[in-house]
Amino acid sequence: MLIDSQYLKALAAAIGFSDCGIARAESLTDDEYPLGEWLALGYQADMHYMERNAQMRRDPRLLVEGAQSVVSLVLPYKPDRQIESSARIAQYAYGEDYHERIKRMMYQLIARLKERYPDFEARPFVDTAPISDRHWAVRAGLGWIGRNTLFIHPHFGSYCFLGEIVTTAQVDRYDEPFRNDPCGDCRLCVDACPNKAIIDRQTKDSIQNSKYKFQNLLDARRCTSYNTIENRAESLPDELDTRGYAFGCDICQSVCPYNRQAPSAYHLDDERKAQLEALSDADEAAFRRFAKHSALSRIKYPQWQRNINKSRR
């Protein structure tokens, strides 16, 4: 089956996605995705799930039998204002849980494509399977991996949600991978991280001779976002400087010039803002009610309290 790529992209835009790119379903190279080295260095911390299905993370054909194409979709989330709270929350968690929102939109896109192509078969993914969102977005020509190790879109910056539709269909025209490095000599994100979690390949002697020099690595053990979300320990490392964050962290993103110039994509209304700010004093029942359809559902109330206590020190 051959799909009209421009028709697919027009449908994606009509449904609400801000950008769309399409790549052939082939294996990512080590140069593109230095997963093996990252794991060997122990930078995954306790995220042992990253060690499983390593080959599947590179090759979507192992994830979806007969896969021919990977459709990458972008939905920006930069809010028009930020909350004012002693318990700071990463901006991606201000709105509705992105997993639910993007999944609905992707199912709409698949349904619309089936109207024109009845035999169209595909599976949508939003952080729900071993597939690397960032690297497939680069393969699809949508942007690049920044020095902070995040995907950066030239217009929307790194404040973007990503999703993929892996399909057995081919398209009439595939996009070229994004090969430029617009970050240049900028090191604002590297220098801004209070815990030095971004391992800069220009200065890290132990991996100075790596064949993957062009990509920095993130040491999750030092990362505030990892520690406040993925780390299940009763207490956080004493040396961790959270800068007041109780869920996630935006520090390396907030200093990025591409994010500073990016347009707002989400209106944080007064009611939602007040609810977010009230979470610092919420009891368990109130926290669970709010978190149910929010990215905050990634953590339990005891973790939330642990993080708040750390952020207030």
Image (cartoon, grey):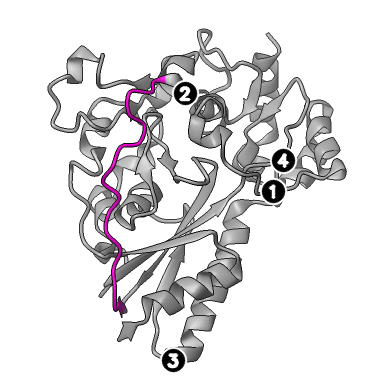
Where residue 173 sits in the image (x, y, percent)?
29, 73
Q: Give the residue pinned by disc 1.
A: 266
Q: CA distance from mark 1 to mark 4?
A: 6 Å
Q: Give the residue pinned by disc 4.
A: 80
Residue type at the position of mark 3: Pro
Residue, x 38% and y 23% (percent of image)? 186
From this view, report whether residue 12 is shown above or below residue 304: below
Residues under numbered marks 3 and 1 in contact, where contact means CB atoms less than 8 Å apart: no
Q: Is 114 left or right of 99, judged from the image as shown? A: left
Foreground disc of the pair 4, 3: 4
Where residue 113 sits in the image (x, y, percent)?
47, 82
Q: Which residues are magenta?
A: 170-187
Screen quadrant of the C terminus: top right
Residue, x 52% and y 70% (percent of image)? 12
Q: In which quarter of the view is residue 221 placed? A: top left
Q: What is the secondary structure assignment of the residue under circle 3?
A: loop
Where residue 25 sits in the image (x, y, percent)?
26, 65
Residue, x 52% and y 75% (percent of image)? 11
- Magenta stretch holds residue 197: no
Q: Is 89 left or right of 277, judged from the image as shown? A: left
Foreground disc of the pair 2, 1: 1
Residue, x 26% and y 72% (percent of image)? 68
Residues under numbered marks 1 and 4 in contact, where contact means CB atoms less than 8 Å apart: yes
Residues under numbered marks 2 and 1 in contact, where contact means CB atoms less than 8 Å apart: no
Residue type at the position of mark 2: Cys
Residue type at the position of mark 4: Asp
Screen quadrant of the N terminus: bottom left
Mark closest to the chain's N terminus, 4 or 2: 4
Q: CA distance from mark 3 to mark 1?
A: 34 Å
Residues under numbered marks 3 and 2 in contact, where contact means CB atoms less than 8 Å apart: no
Q: Give the residue pinned by disc 3.
A: 118
